[in-house]
Each structure stands twice: as structure tokens, then as C-alpha cells.
Image: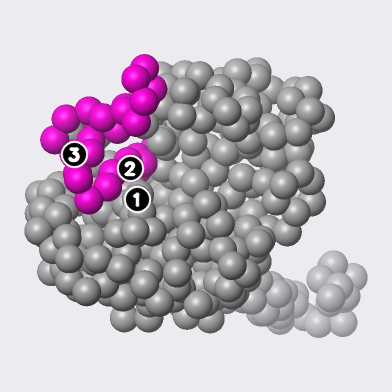
Amino acid sequence: MDLTPSSARSWPPTVSAVLFLVLLGILFSGRAQEPGAAGTGERSPVLFIAGQSREEFQSYLDDVSDGGRACPRPGGASFYTALNLSGVKSPHANLPGDHRQDLRFLANQDGPLVILIGLWLSPEQLPRIAVGGMQREIEALHDSLRDLKRPVLLRVGYEFDGPHNRYPPDAFIEAWRRIALVMRRTPDIQLVWHSFAMLPTFANYPVTAWYPGDDLVDWIGVSYFQVGAEGYHEAPNRDALVAIAREKKKPLLVAEASPIRYTPRQKTLAGKAYWDYWHGPFLDFIRRTPELRAAAYIQVDWDSQAQHRPLDWGDCRLDRDAHVLEHWRNAARESFWLRPSDTLYEQVRAMANSPGE
């Protein structure tokens, strides 16, 4: 559409000006109607979450955001536990010397902080929970999360479809429902159905085989590690999960993300090549996916942890590469990120009710 002055020469000046403004309105009106635009031409706010341990959260605060001076502090933190409440009352590490899970440390941080919690379940626990077992442990977990007095995003049996978890779908669904019915007593406990988002799934079930029902799911979660057809995971199932979130009108959460280096070529990547391989595509995924309302980054040197060292995933801390750190800080200052503020909790509470709006 040509809106140059020459296209309006045959109109009187006043009419030309009015027509010009009307046409501008037509041209830009569609932008405010795009999913996630919220009437501003930008995507809906996204909560940034850092983790996945006490030390890694602190590393993001100190080495990446520099206490909020280099880029904004995260509005959320990751935490992991099990039905034995490991890390809830006191710090817990899976192996001696590894980084610790420490819920009290996170709860005592200055300023508002949403907690993203991964609830580990063993495949042997699922049948017990499904018939009403472990109810006391479930109740104790609920009470601990309720007492946080803030939004909690609870990933029940996270990466439920992963071959490493070996969850039979029927037992998982029934166990989920048992846990969810207790958690529903507290509206601030929002339930995240977190998929491995890779292929193959356990026993090659379709991912929807594990879905417990719209009434007991608040968020759709995905993991984001590999970005291309390389290595063990050759076919990410991410697009299918985005489609499910869109269809069911649920907000999408990247529940775990890290540029793991699991091939010899990836271990040599540095600077712009490293950024272009993983960090750039990750941020592009966030920008172009209106259903996505929160994203968690794992600020970790995997090889420093006894639990993860055998995986040989490398050092994925953002501050280990000057190019990556500079560009990440620039991206973290973009306006779509949800800043920690007095209204943070209310905005997160509203997300489950208004995905992509």
C-alpha cells in the first residue's frame, strides 16, 4: 500500500491528512490482534527462571546479572525435591560435594521470587500413589508449598514421557490425579505437565497418553536441550507440545534449558558460533511462540557435578564465554521479560488464565 504524499495529491490537504491517518490505522491494526501482542505490538510477558540449584541460582545473580546491574534479576528460581521432602527443610545434595537443593535459601531471597519445583517420582512409586498410598507425604508437600505464600509451579513427575523415567501412562495419570487433588486446595500451587519433548518417548507412546485432563493441568512444560538433528536425540518433539498448549489454551513453560555439549563438535564451539548454535535459536523460540509465558535456564558446569559428570555435557554457564555473556545480557534487557516487582505474583497467577494474551 502506497502511503507516500504523491498518492494523495488529488485530495484536499485536510482530507489527505485524515485519509493518511485512517490508512495507518488499517495498516497497523492487525499488529495488535496477533496472539500474544497484548495490544502493544510485542509478545506477552515472559517470566525468566534461573537454577537449578542453590549455587547455580547464586551464580546467575552474581556472574550474569551482577545483582541486577548488568541485566535484570530473575523473577523465578528452580528447585527439585521428592516425596521425602529433600531440600525443603534443610539443604540437600544427591551426591557428596554436588550443588544443593535449598528451598529456604530461595524463599528468603530479597524481592519477589516465583518457585519452579520439579517433583521427582520413581516408577515404583506410581502404582502405590495410584491406589491411595503415600498420602501423608503428599499432604506434607502440599503444606510446605502452601506456606511459601507465593505462586509455585509444580512439575509432577517431570519429563514424564522420557525413556529414562519409565512411567506407564495409566499409572502416571492416576498418581497425578491423586497428587493434584491435594494440591488444588491451594490456588497458588499451579500444576505443570512437563514433557521431555524428545523422541523416542518411553515405549513409543504418543505424548498425549500421559495427559491427566484439562481440569488438573495449568501449564504445559517442555525441556529444551538439543536444537538440531545431532547425536542421541534426533527428533525433538517440541512442536507437538506447542500445538497441544495452543489447542488446550494452556500457557507454555520451558521448564529446563541448557546448551549441553554432547558431541565433539559442540565442545569446540565458542563465541558467535556457540551463540548461533544454541542461545540464539533458544531466544528466537521464546520470541516467536506466543503461548510461551515462562522459561528456565540451567546455569551449570555439568562436569563439576558427580551426578552429571558421566554425561559429559560440559560447562554451560553463560559467563564462561564473553560473547555469549554480552549477548545474553542484551537479550535479558528486552522489554518482554517479566521484571520482579510488587505485581509479579499477580501477573504469574493470571498467566494460567490468559495464555498468549
Label 3 crowd bin: few (<14), some (14–19), many (20+), radius 10 Å: many
> Is 233 rendered above or below residue 302?
below
Q: Is mark 2 on a helix, strand or loop?
A: strand
Work out whether residue 235 or residue 95 is closer to the camera in this orientation and state it: 95
Label 2 crowd bin: few (<14), some (14–19), many (20+), radius 10 Å: many
| Magenta residues (range) | 74-102
Residue 93 at x, y = what percent? 31, 28
Quarter holding residue 110:
top left
Work out whether residue 69 or residue 145 is closer to the camera in this orientation and state it: 145
Q: Which sits earlier in the primary sequence, circle 2 or circle 3?
A: 2
Badge number at residue 120:
1
Badge number at residue 217:
none
Residue 303 at x, y = what percent? 56, 22
Residue pointed to by mark 3: 88
Q: Which sits earlier in the primary sequence, circle 1 or circle 3?
A: 3
Residue 291 at x, y = what percent? 52, 66
Badge number at residue 80:
2
Query: Does residue 350 show up magenta in the picture?
Result: no
Work out whether residue 89 or residue 149 is closer to the camera in this orientation and state it: 89
Q: Which sits earlier in the primary sequence, circle 2 or circle 1?
A: 2
Disc 3 marks a residue whose amino acid type is Val
Left or right of 216? Residue 234 is right
> Is 292 rendered above or below residue 226?
below
Q: Residue at horizontal 52%, vertical 77%?
A: 208
Query: Does residue 82 show up magenta in the picture?
Result: yes
Tags 2 and 1 touching, CB below 8 Å: yes
Label 1 crowd bin: few (<14), some (14–19), many (20+), radius 10 Å: some
Q: Residue at horizontal 63%, vertical 35%?
A: 260
